[in-house]
């Protein structure tokens, strides 16, 4: 009797230990690299809902990575999708085979962005020629409308920053565009290189008074931030992501940490627009004129 | 047969059915890979690891903008491992960054001949889109050169190689 009880006990224990097999196939995870705009925290905060929204809409897992502009090209091989400025896009298109998916719309210029050189009205600087012998502060060196566009304007206007400016610099750390504008406002520098979108945003937020500044020169509008797809990613998935981005509306929401948020509002974006690679030819020409990557000659 | 015998028989039956269900559910599944450390490396594996480490180093130097240092390192790697496509691929990348698209594409062609996976989208080595951009740029460079000097035989030879590569890319899995 005791023997039978022991056998029955072990049989039941053995049967109970059989658990259902784990899910056979887990969803594959794809990596989206977001270029850090102002700071890592800001970038993660802005694009977390968009990443979650794309996961829900496309039906695959997306994970996000905030990557510094100078490290982006090195990281390209580990990414499936990219979100960068237009200069980084043309670099990665040439060197890493990244293809364009959609352009971001923000502010009055829509899916375009424009660089400007600003100065205080009272500085007396009215044109590029007046810049000779002055001090200037630029934005990040891989910023198409915070550095390259202004460098192009200066060179075309006969001012070589290396020889003709008294001094120029680039601020360190985060929120470089704001630092440039404040640097000019508080007269630390005679002129500054800013993206028009960021300047207008600060005016809108009441941080600065437009009346204090004069726009010395404006560059030609070029494509704004760009969603791209790397060459390792499946074409079908790329088209699904593209469609999800182009279909995004202002009222589209996603749940983040139990809170329902508007995707575009938190990303500080007005929407996404269809764009072709040839639309970036103006950026390529500008990079060639200013000896910038990917056409830099050493 | 008392109640305990009946319970035992039922338990055995349930166990047999459950076992069948589990076995049939897992039929055809690949066995999980074991991460057992290799004690000895074959010469081929050791060589490819050395090439991979060298290529990473050369790429880092190249991305830092030190092309003058990266180029001789890549050439040395090619001499040491003439049948490794990756060494040719990295030299092509260096030429592209030096704005020598034709030379770059000729190196890419060598790399593809050594390892056709560079044009196969189904492999992690796929580089087709990058090569497409490079070929387009190199063809423009050659056309401009031939406009200036229509008799330039080296450019004509280069164009032939580019057309070959263009055909390979067009026919690749993308």
Image (tube, coloured by chain):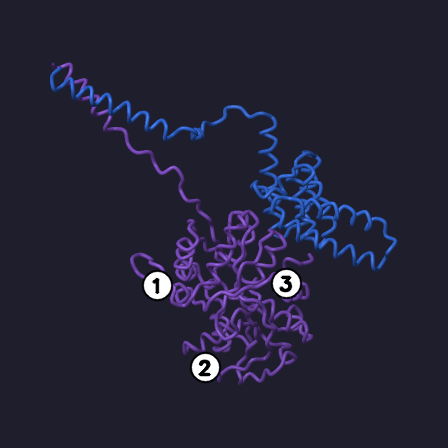
Chain colours: A purple, B blue
Q: Residue A203 location in percent, x, y?
A: 45, 78
Q: Residue furthest front?
A: B1
Query: Residue at the spot x=71%, y=40% of the render?
Result: B110
Element assignment for label 2: loop
Distance of label 3 from label 1 (alpha carbons): 35 Å
Question: In the drawing, does residue A254 fall left or right of residue A9?
Answer: right
For residue B22, what is the image quadrant? top left
**Badge 3: chain ID:** A
- Asked if disc 3 and disc 2 are in contact, CB closer than 8 Å, the reply is no
Crowdedness near tag 1: few (<14), some (14–19) or many (≥20) residues, C-alpha within 10 Å: some
Residue A278 - label:
3
Q: Residue A137 location in percent, x, y?
A: 55, 71
Number of labels in the image equals: 3
- Asked if disc 3 and disc 1 are in contact, CB closer than 8 Å, the reply is no
For residue A190, what is the image quadrant? bottom right
Q: Which residue is mark 2?
A: A209
Which tag is nearer the camera, tag 3 or tag 2?
Answer: 3
Q: Is residue A60 above or below residue B39?
A: below
**Badge 2: chain ID:** A
Tell me which label, 1 or 2, sits earlier in the chain: 2
Q: Residue A161 location in percent, x, y?
A: 64, 70
**Badge 1: chain ID:** A
Q: Which residue is mark 1?
A: A261
Distance of label 1 from label 2 (alpha carbons): 31 Å
Q: Residue A106 location in percent, x, y?
A: 48, 70
């Amino acid at each position: 009797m005791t023997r039978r009880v022991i056998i029955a006990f072990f049989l039941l224990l053995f049967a109970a230990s059989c658990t259902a097999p784990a899910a056979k196939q887990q969803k594959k995870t794809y990596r989206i690299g977001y270029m850090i705009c102002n700071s890592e925290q800001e970038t993660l905060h802005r694009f977390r809902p968009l990443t979650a929204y794309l996961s829900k809409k496309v039906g695959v897992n997306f994970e996000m990575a905030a990557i510094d502009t100078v490290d982006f090209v090195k990281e390209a091989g580990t990414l499936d999708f990219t979100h960068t400025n237009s200069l980084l896009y043309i670099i990665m298109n040439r060197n890493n085979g990244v293809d364009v998916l959609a352009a971001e719309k923000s502010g009055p210029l829509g899916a375009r962005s424009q660089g400007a050189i600003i100065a205080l009205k009272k500085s007396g600087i009215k044109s590029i020629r007046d810049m000779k012998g002055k001090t200037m502060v630029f934005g990040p060196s891989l910023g198409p409308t915070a550095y390259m566009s202004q460098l192009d304007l200066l060179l075309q206007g006969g001012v070589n920053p290396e020889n003709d400016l008294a001094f120029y610099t680039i601020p360190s750390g985060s929120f470089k565009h704001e630092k440039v504008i404040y640097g000019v406002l508080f007269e630390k520098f005679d002129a500054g290189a800013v993206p028009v979108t960021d300047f207008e945003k600060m005016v809108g937020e009441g941080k600065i008074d437009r009346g204090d500044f004069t726009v010395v020169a404006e560059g030609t509008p070029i494509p704004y931030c760009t969603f791209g797809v790397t060459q390792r990613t499946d074409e079908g998935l790329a088209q699904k992501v593209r469609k999800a981005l182009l279909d995004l509306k202002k009222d589209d929401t996603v749940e983040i940490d139990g809170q329902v948020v508007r995707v575009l509002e938190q990303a500080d974006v007005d929407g996404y627009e269809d764009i072709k690679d040839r639309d970036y030819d103006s950026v390529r020409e500008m990079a060639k004129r200013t000896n910038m990557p990917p056409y830099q000659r050493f | 047969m008392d109640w305990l015998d009946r319970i035992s028989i039922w338990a055995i039956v349930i166990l047999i059915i459950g076992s069948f269900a589990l076995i049939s559910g897992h039929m055809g599944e690949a066995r999980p890979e074991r991460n057992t450390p290799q004690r000895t490396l074959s010469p081929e594996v050791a060589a490819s690891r050395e090439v991979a480490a060298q290529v990473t180093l050369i790429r880092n130097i190249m991305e830092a903008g030190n092309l003058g240092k990266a180029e001789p390192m890549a050439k040395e790697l090619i001499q040491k491992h003439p049948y490794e496509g990756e060494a040719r691929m990295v030299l092509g990348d260096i030429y592209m960054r030096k704005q020598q698209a034709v030379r770059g594409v000729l190196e890419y062609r060598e790399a593809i001949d050594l390892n056709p996976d560079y044009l196969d989208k189904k492999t992690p080595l796929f580089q087709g889109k990058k090569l497409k951009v490079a070929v387009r740029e190199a063809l423009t460079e050659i056309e401009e050169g031939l406009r200036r000097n229509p008799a330039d035989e080296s450019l004509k030879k280069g164009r032939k190689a580019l057309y070959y590569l263009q055909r390979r890319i067009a026919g690749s899995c993308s």
